[in-house]
Image: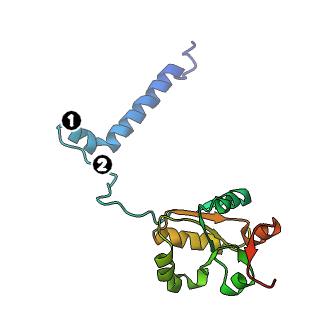
């Protein structure tokens, strides 16, 4: 090593960086370190929930055509149409319940009386560009429904696949 050019050797430079980082860490956490050294109990900065709260930020899970069809065939889910009543009357997935997003608040009490919160729900609307199903799914989660899926392809994909539909003109 040549020290004549005035540069600090690499090892010394690394040691200086470590010492500076340690000094900053000690300075930043001095109150915590003082309490620990004094034997005082340390309180966590993270608040613990005293009672369980429902997840209000949860989002419904996406579902593809084959997954939706499997739940339909096994009768393991209630399908919910988020479209308006006119679209529902014109045609919907066989057995689906109508719960238009625009009527959610008014229709929720009846829906909750007929569909238990532990029921698996599959929400759909007019396909990939329709976001009513996502919005309705989020509202149903906030209303206490725990298993909520959104069938992204919606009624158009279901109908195009030749799966069971009802409503509309024969």
Q: Is residue 40 left or right of residue 8?
A: left
Question: Is residue 66 or residue 138 the one in the foreground?
Answer: 66
Q: Which quadrant is the N terminus positioned in?
A: top right
Q: Residue at x 32, y 51 (%)?
A: 45
Q: Residue at x 71, y 76 (%)?
A: 92
- Asked if one can make out residue 19 in the rendered structure from this viewpoint, the answer is yes
Number of residues whose C-alpha sits closer than 10 Å to that of mark 2, classed few (under 14), some (14–19) or many (20 or more): few
Q: Is residue 66 above or below residue 129?
A: above
Secondary structure category for the residue under label 2 = loop
Q: Check disc 2 and report the residue beneath it.
A: 44
**Residue 75 on image: x %, y %:** 62, 62
Residue depth check, mark 2 versus mark 1: number of the one nearer the observer: 2
Q: Is residue 146 left or right of residue 155?
A: left
**Residue 167 on image: x %, y %:** 73, 81
Q: Check disc 1 and report the residue beneath it.
A: 37
Q: Is residue 152 left or right of residue 118?
A: right
- Asked if one can make out residue 59 in the rendered structure from this viewpoint, the answer is no
Q: For the view shown, which residue lies furthest in the top direction?
A: 1
Could you give the CA–CA distance between mark 2 and mark 1, rounded to whole angstroms?
Answer: 16 Å
Q: Is residue 115 above or below residue 4?
A: below
Question: Can you tell which quarter of the image residue 127 is in?
Answer: bottom right
Question: Is residue 128 or residue 116 the one in the foreground?
Answer: 116
Q: Which quadrant is the C terminus positioned in?
A: bottom right
Q: Residue at x 52, y 23 (%)?
A: 8
């Amino acid at each position: 090593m040549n020290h004549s050019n005035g540069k600090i050797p690499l090892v010394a430079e690394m040691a200086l960086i470590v010492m500076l980082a340690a000094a900053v860490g000690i300075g930043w956490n001095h109150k915590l370190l003082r309490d620990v050294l004094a034997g005082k109990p340390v309180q966590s900065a993270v608040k613990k929930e005293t009672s369980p709260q429902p997840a209000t930020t949860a989002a419904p899970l996406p579902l593809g055509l084959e997954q939706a069809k499997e739940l339909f065939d096994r009768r393991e889910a209630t399908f919910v149409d988020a479209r308006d009543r006119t679209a529902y009357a014109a045609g919907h997935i066989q057995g689906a319940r109508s719960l238009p997003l625009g009527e959610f608040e008014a229709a929720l009490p009846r829906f909750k009386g007929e569909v238990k919160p532990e029921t698996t729900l599959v929400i759909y609307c007019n396909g990939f560009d329709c976001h009513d199903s996502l919005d309705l799914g989020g509202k149903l989660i906030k209303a206490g429904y725990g298993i909520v899926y959104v069938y992204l392809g919606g009624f158009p994909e279901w109908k195009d696949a030749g799966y069971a539909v009802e409503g509309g003109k024969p």
